[in-house]
Every structure is written in C-alpha cells, then in structure tokens.
Image (cartoon, rainbow, N blue to C red):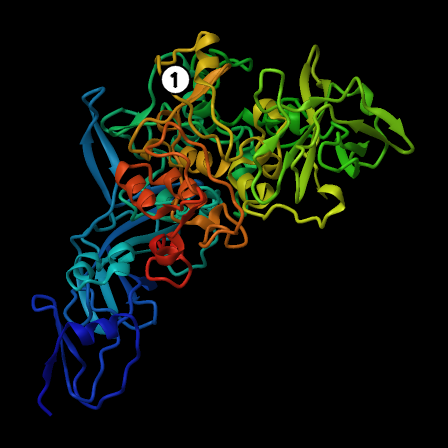
Amino acid sequence: MRGRRIGVALFLLAFVGMGAMGAENDEPKYSPSQKEFYLNEAELAFVQPGLKLDIQSVEVSGTSVTVTFRITDNNNQGLDRLGGETPGTVSASWQLARINPGDSQYTAYTTRIRTNQVTGQPVVQATSETNGTYTSLGSGVYKYTFSTRLPADYPAGATHTVGVFAIRDLRALAEQLGLFQLVKTGRYISNDTFDFVPSGGEVTVVRDVVRTEACNQCHDPLAAHGGGRRTTQLCVLCHQPQSIDDLSGNPIDLKVMVHKIHRGRDLPSVRAGTPYFIEDEDFSEIGWPQDTRNCTTCHQGGTQSDNYKTNPSRAACGSCHDDVNFALGTNHAGGIQIDDSQCTICHPADTGLEFDLSVTGVHTIPNFSKQLPGLKVEITGVTNTNPGNKPTVTFTVTDSKGNPVDATKLNQLSFALAGPTTDYTFVTRSAAGVPATENALATAKPSGSGFTYTFSTALPADASGTYAVSAQARQTYTLAGPLLGQSFAARDDAFNPVFYFGVGGSQTVPRRKVVDVNSKCNVCHKKLAMHGGGRLNNEYCVFCHNPAMVDNPDGARAAGRDVPPGTVPTSINLRFLIHRWHTGEELTRDFKIYRTFGIFSPNEEVFFPGDRRNCAKCHVNNSNQLPLPAGMANTVAPREFFSPLGPAASACLGCHDSEAAAAHAFLQTAVFPSGKSAESCATCHGEGADFAVTRVHAR
C-alpha cells in the first residue's frame, strides 16, 4: 500500500500520545524539513517525548574503548539519534576516566590543554568528547567508539568509568507546530555512568562521597554547564585534582570548588577582598541558607559520605578555611603539613565530644548542641474570647524530656494574637504601631501545673470567626568545651506553638496549611530561624506577614538608613514577600524591604538554586492551585503598579514582577459598585483549565 502524507493535525495527536496501531508495512517516516509524518493508511504515529540513555556494556580492544548503549523516550521506544525515524536529534558527549590504584579520585583520559590566564602556563582540564564514531544496531541501540585512546601502560586492573550526558531538544519543532506545552518542556536530558575494570575483574573501588539526591534537596535539579550535567557521578569525572580553571587559576576539583561556592561570601579570602570565581562566574555573593558547619546536609547517603571526617585532607579543609596555608603553617595550630598523612592525629573522625578537635567536634554548632536541654511551650487553652475581650492564655513550659521549666525565669517569653484565620489582618502591635509580640515575662503567672498570660491587647470589637495565639520562648546558655578555656554562647529556642480558638465560642477553623516549615523550608534551610532566631514556625510568621502589613521606609530613614526620599511602603505579606525573596536576582525590577535595623534587597543578595516552577517544593495540599479559598484579604502594596492586590495577584506578582504581568492581573480584577472586588484568575488558571497553574509551571 502506497504511503500518504499525514500533516500537522495527525502529528498533534501522535505527539500527545493518543496511541498507536500496529502495521505490517514499513515503519512511519518522519521528515523534519517538511514537519510531517509519512504514514501508511493503516498506521498511526506514536511518538512520545522524553529521553533516557542507558549504557549497557563497555568493551576494550587494545587501547580502543567502545560503549554499547540504548536511547529511548518516556514510553521505552527506541530513538533515532539523528532524528530521521523519530522527531528530534539526540546529541551526546562522552567522558572516560579511571581511579588509579591506591587513589580515591578520578584521573581523566578525555582531556584538553588550556593556558592559565593567571600564570601563563599550560593547564590540563578534564573534558568530554563528541568526535568518536557511532554504529547503529537498531531499535535505539548504538555503539560509540571513543576517539580518545588509552595509553599503552594504562592500569587495566583499575576501576574505569564511562560517563555521558545526552540532550534531545524538541522545543523548536514544538513551537513550529503550536504545541505550547512542549515549547516549555521539550528539552530532555539524560546522564549515565558505567563502571568497569578493563581486565575483567569486579569493580571494588568507587567514588561515592556526595549523592545527586543530596544536592537536589535544594538544587531541584542540579544542572550545570547549560543544564546538561545533572549527576554527581558525572561531575566527579571532570571535577577532580587534575583540572584547573584557565581563567581564574583556581582548582575545579569538586570537593574544593563546591566547598568554596557554598561558603561564598563567608570565605576568609572573600572577606579579605579577593573574589572567588570560576571561568567568568563570580561566586563571592553566594550565601548558603544554613550554617556551613552542617556537613551532613551534603555528606549523606553515599557509601563514602563519611569521607569528610574519616579522610580529612588539606585540599578539602583548606577550601572552606582558605586563610590557612599548610605549606607555611599560617593560621594552622598544627604547623606545617606537607601531606595529608598527619591530619587524623589531631583531627580524628568523631570522639563523641563536642567542640574538640575531632572533625565532628570542630563543626559543632552551639545552637544545635546536644548539651542543650531543649525548650517546649505548649498552649493548652484560651479564655475571654468574646469581641473586645483581652484573651487569657494557659500554657506549659518543659524541656525536651518533659521536665517543667519556670516560665518566669526564661530569657525571653512573649505572645502574639492574630486573626481571623481566613486571612490575618489583625495582629498585636507595639506602641509605635508596628507588628510585635507582647512581653510576658513580668506578668505570666503560675497556674496549676502551668502558667497563664493575659494579653494587654483586646480582640477587635467586631471580631468574628477564628483567631490564633502563638508564643516565643528562649533560654540562653554558656557551654563549656573540652579544651582549656573554651566556652560557647548558645540559644535554646522553642518551636512556636499556634493555638486556634473560635471568637465567642464559635466553631474553630484553623488557617489553611500552605507551607510546612519542617518538611519544606527546612529541607534547604535546615532550621529556618528569623528575626534573631526566635521565629521558627511559618504558621507563626503569617501573624505579622499578613495582607495588611507593609515595610517602614520612614522609620528606616529616621534610623539613618539610606532610603530615597518619597519611598512608599511595600507589602510584607508572606505569600508576596516569599515569592519575591526566592525570585531574587531574577527579578526584573528593584525590590527592597526597608526596616529600622537594615535594608534587605533580594535581587542583589538571593540566588535561588532550584526551579521556581516546582511549586510543590514549598507548597503543601495543592495550596498553589486556583481558585483560592473564599474570604481571603486583599494585599496592601503601595509600591506596586496597583494596590490593593487581590489574593491571587499578591502571590503571582511576587515572582512575575513586570509591569505587563501587573497589567494582566489588574485587568482580571473587577471592582463592583458596592466596593467589593473579585479576581477572575481561576477562569483561565484554575486547575483543569488550559492555562492552569500546574500546566504553565510544568517543567
């Protein structure tokens, strides 16, 4: 049967995976130049997006290395890497490296020579190659023979590794065909590595210090060099002691580079005025969102993740502590060290002691010390809850073992009151009118097995629905270390309890759960602790960071801050503020928060390492989806293009900060003759709609 041409309409069906019917004739042929499938009448093309490259085996013949691999789509259908049989070409770059006998790190065969721009001397860099030869075996299976040859004296009994990253890009084709979703998502990447011993023995030596999943706690996903390198197993093939950056002269050994990047602006060298950069990218402004002494944030899950403490080295330790010169003994109490053989004499892995010279000991964070007894506040009830009343809170204070603690002898104890839970607009304030907690140390009273505190702030006369109370509590300590003269200041902060109550005895309806600090925020932050460390619970943060709250330019100016005259306030509503913070340097216009004790500018200071389209990275319960619950408040935002912002606009315009985005939101906001306003956002962006939040943020 002669084939006939089936055009774009059928290709659309094929692309979204409507299905396929078997045929006895030749396979469908795709002509990229004509953007059409050539199909037999009894056939329907079935082509799925996606990419997976799987290395199946490696053969060594003399000094030649050949890899057998298969490339498939998401439906496990074999792909034509040249794009003749299936849409989209697949490009691949290959790496080859070994772990020398007695070593624990890679040395690459695939290398190049560059000139060090600092010293003028040639430097070696591990790299990848693309100029080998391919042989097709059918059904997406290929052989690739490296153009790089093994040296005649290569260690055949050592662990060797082949690495590859491959890219299949369908975006241009999808754009031509009007496939909106694939225009956004049609670039697919696959990484794979394969360990082998050329002489045929078992692989017993590997490098498995930091796993990709540890990086992806924050990076979501790890994607370097244009996004093609996405696994640490691939990264270590090039980023090892062999490689030097030709522009900066800095080593790009992974353990050195990653430590320096993550310490960033806190590096001693950076603080002393020397920027840290690799190629043309300056990492001197990087601020890791947790304490860099949290080694196990990254060092977890791998068979060698304990290397940081069991196998300390001058290179690894000196990367963070880069004011130490081991060759001269500068800033090193142990004096000159010409190699790593003596490190563990002073720095054993773990003695069980905090603050000693063991690797775990010197990385002890005082506020995480096991010596702290722990502090817990539990709110057990609230009375006097009618409109206009001053509520009384009953609560207990204990340590982590349940032993009672005298609340009146804490270093800090304060309470806050906010409501309603449909969307907070009322919160306790200071005499100056800014959101604040009430100091309870002087007026908290013992009551039975606990204590009571009565607010000086009354509930609004028109209060209704559900309100909430929360607490801050802190005890400070001086911890003694095991070494002579050691002492460390430490804080024990209680996790902020939140207690909901119905005004006047009405039904209690807690605030909707939007984000969970422990399962979401603390994945990256480890322990999110704001405003001096006492705010630990995002359900408490929204008390003050509510739709009615703005920053304080006039107060900041009065405090001597550099605030331009005429600066109007901006919203500090959490859903608006957090999106602006995490967009950071990708904001299209300036965004500053003016406070009496400082100015925060996320677009100058914040680089978010993840993909902000992954709303579930922070949100729970599909709380990012539209429509939003009824009863939410408009957000006061005088510095934006229009104010107030509707509930949806206040979230979306946090990331999408352009004038065009604001105009779109404004046009979708109606103000009725009654003065009430409403948004129509969910019409197009509600779940199930053509431009649903989940669709336009698809990755």
Extreme residue toward the right, this view: 448
Seen from the viewer's position, the closer of residues 197 and 25 is 25
Q: Using the rendered view, name the quadrant where residue 80 is placed.
A: bottom left
Seen from the viewer's position, the closer of residues 479 and 149 is 479
Report x, y in % for residue 259: 44, 30
Q: Is residue 529 left or right of residue 35?
A: right
Image quadrant occupied by the N terminus:
bottom left
Q: Is residue 151 left or right of residue 508?
A: left
Residue 205 seen from this side:
no
Which residue is at 18% across, 21% downward?
A: 120
> Which residue type carries mark 1?
Val
Seen from the viewer's position, the closer of residues 583 and 108 is 583
Judge the density around disc 1: few (<14), some (14-19), many (≥20) Cα neighbours within 10 Å.
some
Report x, y in % for residue 64: 23, 57
Image quadrant occupied by the C terminus:
bottom left
Which residue is at 67% across, 17% downward?
A: 489
Which residue is at 32% across, 54% downward?
A: 162
Q: How many marks?
A: 1
Provide the secondary structure element on which disc 1 rests: helix
Residue identified by numbered label 1:
270
Which residue is at 66% across, 22% downward?
A: 356
Q: Using the rendered view, name the quadrant where residue 102 is placed.
A: top left
Report x, y in % for residue 656: 33, 40
Seen from the viewer's position, the closer of residues 16 and 508 is 508
Q: In this rendering, is residue 127 above or below 410?
A: below
Q: In this rendering, is residue 185 above or below 470?
A: below
Residue 528 seen from this side:
yes
Q: Is residue 459 left or right of residue 445?
A: left
Q: In this rendering, is residue 332 above or below 125?
A: above
Report x, y in % for residue 657: 33, 36
